[in-house]
Amino acid sequence: MFDIFSSAAIQHTSYNRHTGEAFNNVIAPQSFADASSEIMTWDGYVPTPLYRLETLAQSLNLQNIFYKDEGPRFGLGSFKALGGAYAAAKVLQRELTNKFNEKASLSDLRSGKYASLTNTITLVSATDGNHGRSLAWGAQKFGADCKIYIHAEVSEERAKAMRSYGADVIRIDGDYDDSVRIAKTNAEENGWFVVSDTSWENYTQPPTDVMAGYGVMTNEITQELSQPPSHVLLQGGVGGLAASVCAALRQKWGKDSPRVIIVEPELANCLYKSAIKDTLTSVHIAEETIMAGLSCGEPSPLAWSILREEASDFLSIPDIFIAPAMKLLAKPIGNDPGIIAGESAVAGLAATIAISQDERLRKSLGINTTSQILLIGSEGATDKALYDKIISG
């Protein structure tokens, strides 16, 4: 059943973590609390499910696998619904103060009290799909204009989803990192406001707000679990999801927080390379990974400041693991629940299965029969046609 997961090697590097307080200082506990208080008031808010994959855990000689399914989040299909929309509201709130001298609350924005002012403000970002959908939804919710830049490989179905929330979607040549640069340049030239999930020099507040929004998901997890898991496997990308989750877990559980393992595609492993060199390192995307949401060549400095202190291990996995992992969730073994999971959602699951087939790697990562693994199922079928093709293939 798991033969494919032992057919290719996982790249692994252990990391000599730095000592510091980034988990408290980059995203303060109050920032997480404020984001949760706001987002939980939004129409349609319900906690997403935290599944226990008991049969799969037994098959892999593990005690437990917990899978947080973000597919149902606000009907947008991914955890990014929490970050982009919340950061959009915070940007608009600050701009109402700076430009119009209006001390607007977030509830004022939600009510449309300042719609005549917010509709003069343009929010912009680059995306592989999910962040852009969240930003477009948030801009529509809070009454702002929105422009989204996508690269050549972003599917048209994902582009249509963003347009359905009123966004002007601009497709560029190149990859995700090119779209980030073009969005930034055009925003500077036109007086637009970038709402990005990655950071750069002198640009940290919106990415911090994005990561604070993600804390809603982690808060839901910690409310359901009576004790911390032993390990958490987190998707890479630019690092925002991973940094948010491990910071929030550390704030909750302190020294008992789970061992943090970062998982990336071999084709886009900038965090893995950064860990090897112990400094921020970009990689060239020569070929797009099937894990579209993780196809990022440049790590976020803000996220890295947390990960360099909290992450113990970094893994790169091949694309061939992804379809089998998606199918395993769609058609589970035993009494495990069936779950619709997109390509980027299953990175941690695929790595967990592959690790379990490799005794050397199990030992290196401290994974054994008592291990309790937490996974973030970051998206559902955000491209339904692609999902159906993969599952039926």
Image (cartoon, rainbow, N blue to C red):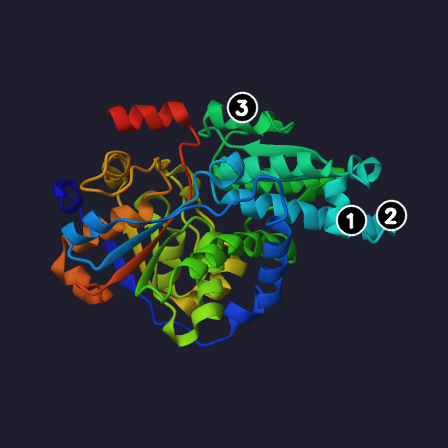
Between discs 2 and 3, the one toward the N terminus: 2
Instruction: Give the camera-side residue of 207 and 388.
Output: 388
Image position of 160 with respect to 331: above or below? above
Name which residue type carries label 2. Phe
Residue 225 found in image quarter? bottom left
The outermost residue toward the right is 101
Give me the disc on residue 160: 3
> Of helix, strand and loop, which one carries label 3?
helix
Instruction: Give the camera-side residue of 299 and 332.
Output: 332
Q: Which residue is mark 2?
A: 100
Name which residue type carries label 1. Glu
* Residue 71 placement, left or right of 259: right
Quadrant containing the N terminus in the rendered view: top left
Question: Could you say where residue 370 lies in the image, as x and y percent from the top left?
Answer: 20, 65
Q: Which residue is depicted at the point 64% across and 29% down?
A: 167
Give me the disc on residue 95: 1
Check contact, mark 2 vs mark 1: CB within 8 A.
yes
Image position of 17 with respect to 185: above or below? below
Q: CA distance from mark 2 to mark 3?
A: 33 Å
